[in-house]
Image (spheres, grey):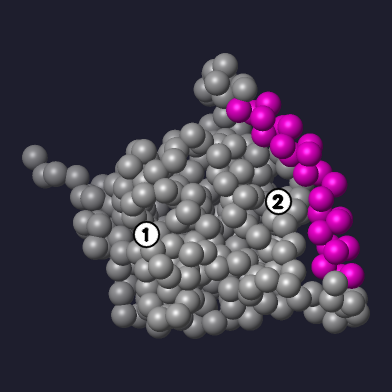
Amino acid sequence: MESRKKVGLVLGSGASRGWAHIGVIRALEEEGVHIDYIAGCSVGAYVGAIYASGSLESLETFLLEKDGKKIFSYFDVVFPKSGLLNGSKRVQELFSMHTDVKTFADLNIPLMMVATDLEQGKVVILKSGNILSALRATMSYPGLFEPVRMGGRWLVDGGLVDPVPVGMARAMGAEVVIAVDLNSRIVSRTKAGAGVAKAAHSMQTTSKPVSAENGNRNELVKKMSDYYDNIEQRLRQKTSDLLHRDHSTPDIIDTVMTSVSIMQERITRINLAVDQPDILIRPRLGELKMMNFDQIEHTIEEGYIGAREKMEDIKTLLGG
């Protein structure tokens, strides 16, 4: 009997577009596509780590129930240091509220992340040790979040060198690589059939009983969410006050994010031309700015639809 092909899932960078990865994973789960390896960059590494820990449902529930704009308020302004925001404490909270996993070895699925050596400009592969330190490194968006010191090197977002790390998945042993590129500027379709992701989410959440442990974790999430509800306004006010910004000019955060996004799109095109995945999923999110945290349901839905469109090709590669 022919053995099953090993599948590698590559989750690319993309800031708030990263929630599309949730929709992609849901579509794969529905069809029983087993993921053997995960390679992630930036927000893709975050979603991949949550999924590999078995806690994707908790993250999805949190995102859909919370005002998306307040997600950004989980980060602290740290002027005048090497980044506008300090992500260390908040990344830990945003990860630990969903799972108790501490190290790569605790994950259910092997995971690798990519970061960038700020001094050498080289790819750094993170695959062992403390997972929170690795997440802080791969998510350290240049100019926005402070660099992270690891192993004697200053590390920043892996999207500077490899936004969609296909080669990493192949190196892990994947025979079929499914990659998700969020840097495409393809504009989304009309929202006909809106609510697909929400319906899929409902199917996932209503079919499982809520354990006492999950209930306690949900209560913790609620308390933390309530605590941060008023931070967004203070964050934006502090940013404007410190920069004396004219509101008619582009927002500094959007400017930084969009500029790096343009660069990552070009790098992604070059990298994918050299190291092509077997399946390339490109959710239609081109109209979304990188900090559109207020369109979470739509973003998840586009990821779900994008994966569904490729499902027949995926099944063919996996032998039906």
Residue 196 visible to an observer of this rendering:
no
Question: Residue at horizontal 74%, vertical 69%?
Answer: 79
Question: Residue at horizontal 80%, vertical 79%?
Answer: 250
Front-most of residues 280 and 8 = 8
Question: Residue at horizontal 51%, vertical 69%?
Answer: 156
Residue where numbered disc 2 is placed: 74
Type of amino acid under label 2: Tyr
Magenta segment, principal secondary structure? helix
The residue furthest front is 152
Question: Residue at horizontal 37%, vertical 73%?
Answer: 123
Type of amino acid under label 1: Leu
| Magenta-span inclusion, residue 90 | no
Find residue 302 and report its image quarter: bottom right
User: Residue 156, relative to residue 172: is it above or below?
Assistant: below
Rendering coords of residue 232 (x, y %):
81, 54
User: Residue 1, relative to residue 43: is it above or below?
Assistant: above
The residue furthest left is 1
| Magenta-span inclusion, residue 238 | yes
Rendering coords of residue 175 (x, y %):
22, 57
Instruction: Say what secondary structure mark 1 lies in.
Output: strand
Q: Residues within 10 Å of mark 1 (few under 14, many from 20)?
A: many
**Side (left or right) of 121 relative to 277:** right
Q: Any mark on residue 109, and which?
A: none
Mark closest to the chain's N terminus, 2 or 1: 2
Residue where numbered disc 1 is placed: 126
Numbered range of the magenta stretch: 217-241
Instruction: Say what secondary structure mark 2 lies in.
Output: helix
Rendering coords of residue 219 (x, y %):
68, 26
Q: Residues within 10 Å of mark 2 (few under 14, many from 20)?
A: many
Residue 235 visible to an observer of this rendering:
yes
